[in-house]
Amino acid sequence: MKKPIAAILSILLIMRMIPSTAVFAQEAPEAEQVIDIDRADADTLPEAESYTIVDNGQPLLEVVHVKEPAATAALSDGSTNGYYTAEFMIPESTFQVYLTGLTQDNVSEIRQAIIESYTEGRDFDLKNLGFIDAEKTWETDGDEYMCWAASTANILTYTGWAAQAGFDSADDLFEAYIDAFENRGGNVRFATGWFINGIAANSLSQPREGTGKYLPQYNFRDVAEEITLRQNCAAQLATVFDRLKEGYGVSLSLDIYNSTGFEGGHAVTCWGFVTDVRYPNTSKQYYQSVFITDSDSDKYSVQGDTDRRDADDRMSLFTLEPEEQEEIDTYRFNITSKQTAMISSSVTVKPFSEEIPYETDPDATLDMINDPDIELNPFVLTDDPDDYSTVTTFAPDTTIYYQPYMMNGAKADYYGDVLLQISVKNSQGIEIYTKNFNNHNLRIPSSAGLRYNKDSIKSSMPVGDYTITASFNAEHQITEAYYYNNTRTINFKIREQYLLGDANGDGAISTPDITKMQRILARMDHSMDDMMRQRCDINHSGDLALPDVTVLQRKLARMEVAFPVGETRFYD
């Protein structure tokens, strides 16, 4: 069943497990912003943009102001300082909390709640503190199946895109979706496409003609990405979590099951996680709980003359349980007492920033309804002829394969000739490889693509930094909605390799490596350099430390370890 935040965190607070040091993200606060909890008064603490609360010198809570170019763009009038994140350890446990989407109005209450829960044993309650939580209404207002629109409105508001289009709140934007779309199931990524470009390709619910298209100089494919979470969910969640920390908006798609079986799909908005820092961020044990807002959580309070804006802004915490079935490896949680939710995918939306590419060419029509739009995406770079995942670091003398893929994301078909040009340059800008592909009378239908066969670069490039660029329609022979996305560049590196844990660099993992690391820590050996530091940093802390030696000792004793000792890595 769904567990309220107060209850689950109260339980976590009394759990006694192995103590752990907090791991903090983003910039550290200045010295005057470190507050000792023994002298702290939750009512009189000075207002600070970012600060850390400590107990006897040990970090308890870090609150960080999210700065440009992150979610501060969501504020249209500049009267507040933007969104905040809170990151802290549950005392006397190995559980770390990361929560974002906080505002200047509620971050002090979060601080007070955490101080009081730690010093006075009070509940940690995160209800009605102004969270972004667009709410559906009860029964008859035409939004029953539009959870996807509510979640899209939440993340577009959080990331700043809604404010750029003149929307003051997630509820206002949600109602724009309700007015424009059929009351049917949909997709958050394509709902973002309607908001930016006026199209909702491949979505079940389709918009009325002439709606949306609020920021047509951008392309939604640069902004929103869907990540499948049905297989190897923990590893994929690491990407989702990293993006959440970078200011992205995150929606989760769920498969809902009841006592009779599959009930339907649902979309919620993700704001953070409780994690167990004893494990790597790609392990199943790392993700313990998830913070979400749900457009269904208080819809029954919105009926009669009440407004959706009057509904509670409720953030809930759900305990995650690994779920493994045939062809499924994900997480589930009890979203209600009678319903189980299984995580199936996520859509992440970049925070608005002036760094995001957009169309400036006056020849571009910005019309994805009536004109084609060919984008080079993906542009694959790999060392495996059978792999389609891009890698950007290669060993010397490796055959490098590249493969352009031309995708038509508009509703209009593409007809015409294509000259595709490939170029590789070194860090001095010198072209070291070039090749042209000529195709005549191509037809690329709407929502379809053209994938070239893989080609290879078989040159002995020395260790260094390089770029490979693919470009087409450079002379604008064919009219398109956008031209800026006709070029794709990948930065890649040629680097030597090492084995993780091979302290002495002899190409093997053995007892002398432990001795080498111990001598360095005891300052009996001063041979440490940056390359050795990378070989010795087994737990990815940034430097050689005692835990690295412990992990290596356990590995050589044939005991289970959570880090890939002996794995081949590239030097930075």
Image: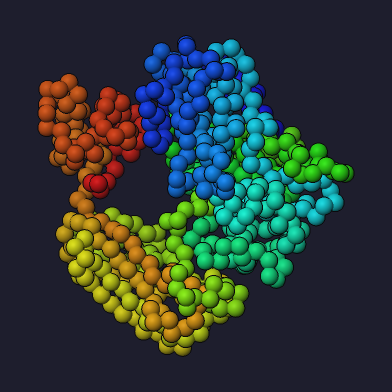
Residue sitting nearer the eye, 18 or 87: 87
Q: Is residue 366 above or below residue 256?
A: below
Q: Is residue 27 left or right of residue 15?
A: left
Residue 133, position as x, y percentages in the image: 67, 42
> Quarter-wise, where is residue 273 in the image?
top right
Q: Residue at x 26, y 27 (%)?
A: 545
Residue 211, position as x, y percentages in the image: 68, 66
Q: Is residue 501 left or right of residue 472?
A: left
Q: Residue at x 21, y 52 (%)?
A: 495
Task: Answer whether residue 272 is visible to the viewer in this image.
Answer: no
Residue sitting nearer the eye, 294 or 78: 78
Task: Answer whether residue 119 is visible to the viewer in this image.
Answer: yes
Q: Is residue 461 above or below residue 476?
A: above
Residue 2, position as x, y percentages in the image: 68, 33
Residue sitting nearer the eye, 206 or 337: 206
> Quarter-wise, where is residue 32 in the image?
top left
Q: Residue at x 44, y 38 (%)?
A: 281
